Image (spheres, grey):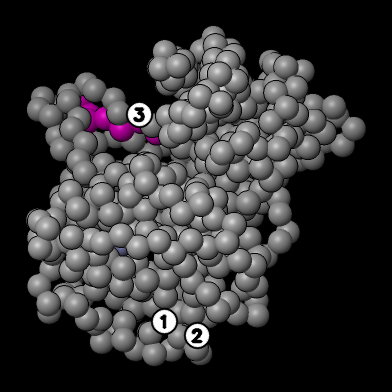
Amino acid sequence: MISNSRIVPKHDPFDGDYSGNVFDGHLHGALYAMTGRQNPRTGINKIGLVIADRYESLPGAFGIMFDQRFVPNSSSRYLRVPREGCAIFLDAITSKRQSDEQLRELSFTVIHELGHVFNLQHTNATSFMRQSAGHPHVFRSDAFKFTQDDRYRLSQCTASRHIRPGGSAFEDLGDMANANTQKQSQLSTVLDLRIDLSSREFWRFEPIELDIQLYANGSRKKSIKIPNAMDPGHPQFCIWIDDPDGERWRYRPERRFCGGEGTLTLKPEETWWRDLAFFGQAGGYTFSKPGIHTVQVTLECHALGRVESNKLVVNILAARQDDPLYESAKSCFEAEAIGMLMHYRCFINRLPPGTNRLRDYCDAFSDHASAGMGRYKLGRAIVRRLKQDGKESVIGRFRHLASEELKQAVTDRSLGDGRRSKAEKDLLSL
Ligand SMILES: [Zn+2]
């Protein structure tokens, strides 16, 4: 069995209690509490490993790797350290492994995740960088090693920023990349993918969400099973953005999952939907310049081929000085705590500073799409907080606040049906 031990860093947002569900925002906070202020330009000397019970975003994941976290509009480089740590999740490991295999799986996963911190990528070769969560048993001892290529990369840790933690972004391997490029698979004839955005014109700091719909195309009579990898944290799922200068780049998630995605069954004529926070990515805002951009999603579905979504044209608005709406929206959403609340849809313990200003903004500009989204995210974050910890002292006030925000979100047509029904579900749970 995995034994208990407690090492609690200073300023730990959880105060050492990592039981129950943990969220992305919490994990980034916990990692920062461990590593402290580190300057990636001069080189970092600490990396962190968070050991928690259960990962809310992907309960089947054995581990994840953190790239830079999202911090709105902050010029502080200390808050944007690439590949600074990882997390492992004991519940997923203990539920999928017999008790005599758990400790070996735990050691394998720890080294696998630390491998990602050194920018090592997944491989099918028998090695630490093979994904283990999808296998029925822990790998045999011959997998407890790195491939020759990865051993070479690790040996270059001091010399190369592409390997050293805190150096280049995850997957940016520069001259350390393998020459074997993956060949692109055939386009799927079975699946269709459609994307939309909660607004098509917005300032880059507005809490925009990307809506993703996946469905089997019309001719299909039977249900199909596909990996449930509809998140940019999975390598199969990519969001591509073409900027006004014609440059194409890939949206950068702040965390990378290692398997555990499970499967999704699509019945004929059924549409699967999800939304994801899209205005922020690893390191900062998704869009850095105003102008027309196009957004497209691709999904690799193994035997079913590659699915490409429609291309969405969006207009990132330029600053509009002396416009009360622009000035208010900017000061509300660019505030660090509110930006992070909008992106991670969670907060730790107390309501984040700026919550009252957010509520005032939503009242003053209630017709604007960002106000509806602000209420929706605040209301749902409070419900999440209540589910995590129902101490009587906080329940009353939080419940009242959440119910006020969610009642408005349920009737706000600009949010779309999917979000309105999520808001309704949360409201009923109060
Ligand atoms: Zn992995």
Mark 3 → mark 2, Cα distance in angstroms: 41 Å
Quick one: label 1, few (<14), some, or many (20+) residues within 10 Å? some
Which span is picked out in magenta?
A: 212-218
Q: Residue at x 57, y 46 (%)?
A: 280
Q: Position of residue 209 (x, y in %)?
A: 52, 34
Residue 252 vs 379, above or below: the answer is below
Asked if residue 146 is among those painted magenta in the image, a careful observer would answer: no
Q: Are marks 3 and 2 in contact (CB under 8 Å)?
A: no
Q: Amino acid at mark 3?
A: Trp
Quick one: label 2, few (<14), some, or many (20+) residues within 10 Å? some
Quick one: 277 or 217, which is closer to the camera? 277
Q: Which residue is mark 2?
A: 160
Query: Where, quadrant-wise, is the C terminus in this rendering?
Result: top left
Q: Which residue is mark 3?
A: 273
Query: Where, quadrant-wise, is the N terminus in this rendering?
Result: bottom left
The quadrant holding residue 86 is: bottom left
Q: Residue at x 29, y 44 (%)?
A: 59
Q: Are marks 1 and 3 in contact (CB under 8 Å)?
A: no
Q: Main secondary structure of the magenta part?
A: strand
Secondary element at tag 1:
helix
Q: Which mark is residue 176?
A: 1
Q: Is residue 81 left or right of residue 143?
A: right
Respond yes or no on whether mark 1 lies under 8 Å from ligand 1.
Answer: no
Secondary element at tag 2:
loop
